[in-house]
Amino acid sequence: MPGSKDLDPSSSPRALLGAELRHARERAGLSQEDLGQRLFVSGSFVGQLESAVRRMQPEIARLIDVALDTGDFFSRNCLATAKSKYPEHFAEAVEAEASATEIRQYSPLLIPGLLQTAAYARAVFRAYRPTASVEVIEGLVAARLDRAHLLDSPTAPLLWTVIDEAALRRVTGGRKVMAEALNHIAALVQQNQVIVQVPPFDAGAHASMEGSMKLMDFADSPPLLYFEGVGSGRLEDDPGTVRYQRRTYEFLTAAALSPEKSLVMLEAMAQDYSHEEPL
């Protein structure tokens, strides 16, 4: 059984908890698939817990304690990994995003969070929460911008985004805000920090018109798929579902403008937005 002491929250508690889970599972002579069956999850889900890609939720921790005869060790220590500045439905996806080696995302209605400017994010959050205090909105903006530091690292993941023209045409926060937002994306493309493609309106129907998606690949863990709706989100690790959505993404990129033509479009739209507000 793991030691009786709680894990030290200052020492990457989720990674430590994952290591303890692997140790306890191997000591019990179980494979990831074996343990997954006892937890009513997939073996890949167990692997993602062990590699700290996914957060251990309290209900899973309780089942682990029973399955591996670890007392209440995982139930107690999983709480150290549960604190987040992000909404509950999104927190686990953000944490997975931070350890991904490749991220592919389609956004039909707004600029993806990793590419947003402060002014654009502020306008989005104010639309979501029209009665929230300035302090709440600014806290959300700060958290969103903090995520974007992921792109500053020399080991940053490959970020390949497909942004629908609809997201670029919706004037969010005003024309000045949109000009800044599109210039920001164009600069990231020019600095080779991100690949961006735009499916234009005149391309007609495409493979992902029903909603957004985010595919995440990892060095030592199976891929994950994230779906998001209004105030809700879901991580999916089913291999068949991930394969299907990866193929959908490939169809989508085939229907979009090339990265070079998409950059030209972004720069032209930013120039249009930079003109005076229409009367």
Image (cartoon, grey):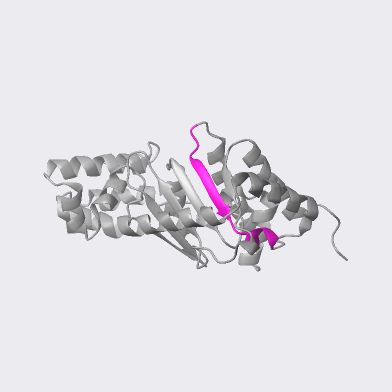
Q: Position of residue 80 (x, y in %)?
A: 37, 47
**52 lies above or below 135:** above
**Observer-nearest of 226 and 269:** 269
Span colored in magenta: 155-169
Residue 226 drawn at (x, y percent): 43, 57
- Does residue 274 appear to the left or right of 16 in the view shown? right
Tell me if 33 is positioned left or right of 145 in this view. Answer: left
Q: Is 122 above or below relative to 147? A: below
Q: Quadrant of the N terminus?
A: top left
Q: Magenta stretch: residue 47 in it? A: no
Q: Is residue 50 visible?
A: yes
Farthest residue, direction left: 29
Residue occupying the far right of the picture: 279
Residue visible at 51% across and 57% down in the picture: 252
Nearest the viewer among 204 and 136 is: 204
Q: Position of residue 105 (x, y in %)?
A: 50, 53
Check if residue 161 falls in the magenta segment.
yes
**How many marks on residues?**
0
47 left or right, relative to 230: left
Q: Is residue 152 or residue 249 the one in the foreground?
A: 249
Q: Quadrant of the C terminus?
A: bottom right
Residue 4 visible within the image: no
Q: Tell me if 66 is positioned left or right of 269 in this view.
A: left
In the image, residue 197 lies at what x, y percent? Answer: 59, 50
Residue at screen point 52% across, 53% down: 254
